[in-house]
Image: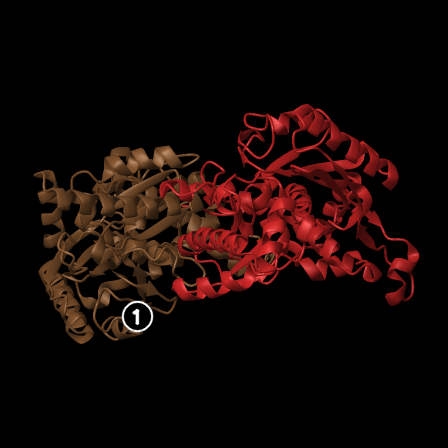
Chain colours: A red, B brown
Amino acid sequence: MGRLTGGDPSLLRRINSAVVLHALRTAAPSAAPTLTDLVKLTGLSRPTVEGVIEGLMESGLVMEASAEEGAARRQGRPARRFRFRVEAGHLLGIEIGPHRVAALLADLRGRVVGSASLEVSETASADERLERVREAVADLLRRSGVACGSLRAVGVASPGIVEADGTVRLGTALPEWTGLRLGERLRRSFRCPVLVENDANAAAVAEHWKGAATDSDDVVFVLAGLSPGAGSLIGGRLHRGFGGAAGEIGALHLLGREATPEEVLSTTGQPLHPLDEAQVARVFTLAREGDVRAQAAVERFMRRLVHDVAALVLALDPELVVVGGWAAGLDGVLEPLRAELARYCLRPPRVAQSLLGEAAVATGALRLALDHVEEQLFAVESTVTARR
Amino acid sequence: MGRLTGGDPSLLRRINSAVVLHALRTAAPSAAPTLTDLVKLTGLSRPTVEGVIEGLMESGLVMEASAEEGAARRQGRPARRFRFRVEAGHLLGIEIGPHRVAALLADLRGRVVGSASLEVSETASADERLERVREAVADLLRRSGVACGSLRAVGVASPGIVEADGTVRLGTALPEWTGLRLGERLRRSFRCPVLVENDANAAAVAEHWKGAATDSDDVVFVLAGLSPGAGSLIGGRLHRGFGGAAGEIGALHLLGREATPEEVLSTTGQPLHPLDEAQVARVFTLAREGDVRAQAAVERFMRRLVHDVAALVLALDPELVVVGGWAAGLDGVLEPLRAELARYCLRPPRVAQSLLGEAAVATGALRLALDHVEEQLFAVESTVTARR
């Protein structure tokens, strides 16, 4: 039991504020609540609700609803009605990938109001790549008519192991990425909090929010490619690991002194380029057309993917495995994975394909920005929770 | 935000009760607090503290301290002083293993006041094994002068995947263990809650409580043997997995169509018996003495252990790996493990040997019983925490 407070009045005010805001935020737009409604919904006293509402209106997060918003239940002298101002701020979710940068713009409820993406060369320098991010965001804000000052939080996802301060500890997929102070660089462009996350972690969060994992809290998301990455949710929460490296299962094969990922799918003896997705897709096509060497290469690829996913499943025992990334779009990845996991795992998880596809990483980055804002608005858990 | 309550008076009473009990429980025995002390310590009003103390005394958990317990600070008319009654109940931690059953008896603070263990044959039936448990417990209670009715919770740990209700879903290490309703069977013997857990999970909890992992909240405990099991703590909490099977990494080798664990350490071509620890120790001794076939066997064993631990580390990214189980006692297990993990993990964890050794599993079972009682006494977190 750490910070359990017996009678902290400012904490109590924050809890009450959060309770009222929650009630306003979940009310249907057609039924903006009155003070009386809020008293009933929250169990708080009328003077407490009045005080809280006043504070929330001052902060710009709550406003009086216009007449028609409460029309359905009007009777006699109309009572004042209140609503959460979803338009009081905006959020950005940004993906920085090897081939493209993408951004999603959303209101304070997380509803997407615009998107943009730009191609970028896989050999682009860190400066060039970040410049493309700024271009995409500027274009998106302009087209959406949203001022940069309206942004309340920005989530950013990219390959690599990301530290808590937004520095990339290790990122071999993008040039000049290892050691890059990505959070610090982007904070110069935005005047709001910037949260940086690993791409597979972000995608896991996204699939849980609005993809293939909405009905499960224990999920492993596999970003399947030549060297797979993974993100895990445990009890609905992202598991980053002690050093942010959880799920970086790709190194397991080095232990067995096996071939590198780039050699596994090669049919020529020459390793494939790790980011050359077209070339990889060709190997799969050749295999389907009966090419024996391509079939052997695909089998090697599948065996490795199954092994990596099995290691994650045995270590974590998730309810559900979601497979995304470009390899998930190739035929014949999901079925063998399912069959092999059923064979070797003591409690095989369900296996599903990503529903968000290409949008998963940016969507996850957006959700992280939304989480940050909600934590600020509804900061109850971290202060009231009693921990041993 | 699920069950956030604005103004539930019974919840408030429970929180206040927990706050007062916590203050009493952490007070030094030589300084039993007065009502005035408790008002200061908790921030609650005097009438509230008085009401709470009354309730706690009725439940038998709190009593007035005798004169000398508050002597240090007495002055004028002595104020009433109060203390937590650690002797108000007892806890049991039970290990059910292949070769022995063991039990630890503790007071309500978790301090061990007695222990017992009995040998049992690895071929004993489930009935025989449970009878040995009852014998060991009866002997322990008798020797300690503690009535069975004083037990408030019993923790039990054994090999196998254990479901939430205490049924063993899969347990190949002990005869008749798969499908055994272990919790239900033991609940017949005790008139208090019985909590059943996997042995490696329990050992992980124990090392965190009073072993090699007291200073880390992100820990993988490896119960190293022919087929290793593992338990993980994430953020200080046991990670059981969706189906209780997390850490059962032993099956990973089946995927590579490699030799079974029993074949790995064999020097004769004949598989070893999985539970014949003496035979395994002989192989290690022969290897140290220069036997080439034994050295090759040990190298195979180490390679597999490193691979299994690496899979756990890459999936979970813990701060610390604690190695226990009989293999941890063999020379030359820790150093190679450390070196190989440093070589292949992006962020290598610290590697430490179990400090609790043979006592780890029963100690963990005891901690689970203590957790259960504390949750009941201090049930704040689960009711106040706001969840999305």
Q: Position of residue A241 (x, y in %)?
A: 46, 41
Q: Which amino acid type is shown beneath numbered disc 1?
A: Gly
Residue carrying label 1? B183
Q: Position of residue A83 (x, y in %)?
A: 80, 52
Q: Position of residue B263 (x, y in %)?
A: 21, 56
Is residue A272 shown left or right of residue B306? right
Looking at the image, which residue is at 63% across and 25% down?
Answer: A184
Quadrant of image for the N terminus of chain A: top left
Q: Is residue B239 above or below residue A139?
A: below
Residues packed near mark 1 inside 10 Å, few (<14), some (14 to 19) or many (20 plus): many
Query: Nearest the camera: A286 or B43?
Result: A286
Is residue A369 shown left or right of residue B217? right
Query: Nearest the camera: B203 or B316?
Result: B316
Q: Chain of mark 1?
A: B
Residue A16 shows up from this direction: yes
The mark total stands at 1
Residue A67's image quarter? bottom right
Looking at the image, which residue is at 36% across and 33% down?
Answer: B343
Query: Nearest the camera: B268 or A65?
Result: B268
